[in-house]
Amino acid sequence: MAYVLPELPYGYDALESHIDARTMEIHHTKHHQAYITKVNDALAGSALADKDIVAVISDLNAVPDAQRVAVRNNGGGHANHSLFWTVMSPGGGAPSGGLAAAIDSDLEGFDKFKASFANAAATRFGSGWAWLVVQNGKLAVGSTANQDNPLMGESVAGLGGTPILGLDVWEHAYYLNYQNRRPDYVAAFFSVIHWEEVARRFAEAKG
Ligand SMILES: [Fe+2]
């Protein structure tokens, strides 16, 4: 069964003025769709095509050699963007409850976390993602290149763990509105983080 583009849980203009509608529409319908089309092509006729994309990218060794790079890049792209849409919302706000407590204990508080996450996003050279992950029960911040996902493992992605928040820092995510000003885009992202969804993913990752 081929993967399909998930619907956004809000309209393309819902995150204005932080992320503009045109960027959201192109990002979703063109970029995300392209990853889906390419991973579907790579897995066509394979039993792996019936597995959840998160399960597929979590076990790249199970992918045949000839398809592994295509699945890493495009399956990663599908999984990463699928997470990305859900961790944003028009509301914004701040974390609360167990997640806020974990940010305090594992990451020296919300302000330090923000600085650390913004730094991870700003210093990722070229295209990639900044992440908040759960590693061995604790929160950690880092980044990956291209469409690598921490679920691919540290040996592949350079960062391991279960992602609960991800920020796309490919230029296609911000260029129309922010041009080369990635730090401004990163700052704007903090106004649209859907902390309830991040907290739900945190609880799930903690098990
Ligand atoms: Fe993207």
Image: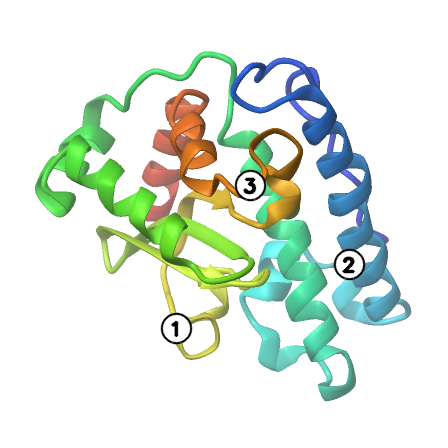
First in sequence: mark 3 vs mark 2: 2
Mark 1 vs mark 2, CA separation in Å: 26 Å
* Left or right: 26, with 125 as reference point: right
Residue 50 drawn at (x, y percent): 77, 58
Determine which quarter of the picture holds residue 66.
bottom right
- The residue closer to the viewer here, 88 or 16, is 16
Q: Amino acid at mark 3?
A: Leu
Q: Amino acid at mark 1?
A: Glu
At a point 51% along the width and 60% down the height, the residue shown is 149
Query: Relative to residue 39, is residue 16 depicted above or below?
Result: above
At a point 33% along the width and 37% down the height, the residue shown is 203
Which numbered circle lies on residue 83?
A: 3
Residue 207 seen anywhere in this rendered image of the structure: no
At a point 54% along the width and 66% down the height, the residue shown is 58
Q: Is mark 2 within 8 Å of ligand 1?
A: no
Residue 89 drawn at (x, y percent): 51, 19
Q: Amino acid at mark 2?
A: Asp
Query: Relative to residue 168, is residue 48 depicted above or below?
Result: below
User: Which residue bears the numbered disc 2?
Assistant: 50
Dot 3 alpha-carbon crowd within 10 angstroms: few under 14, some 14 to 19, many 20 or more? some
Residue occupying the far front of the picture = 180
- The residue closer to the viewer here, 189 or 76, is 189
User: Which residue bears the numbered disc 1?
Assistant: 154
* Left or right: 78, with 162 as reference point: right
* Left or right: 106, with 144 as reference point: left
Query: Relative to residue 139, is residue 71 depicted above or below?
Result: below
Secondary structure at badge 2 equals: helix
First in sequence: mark 1 vs mark 2: 2
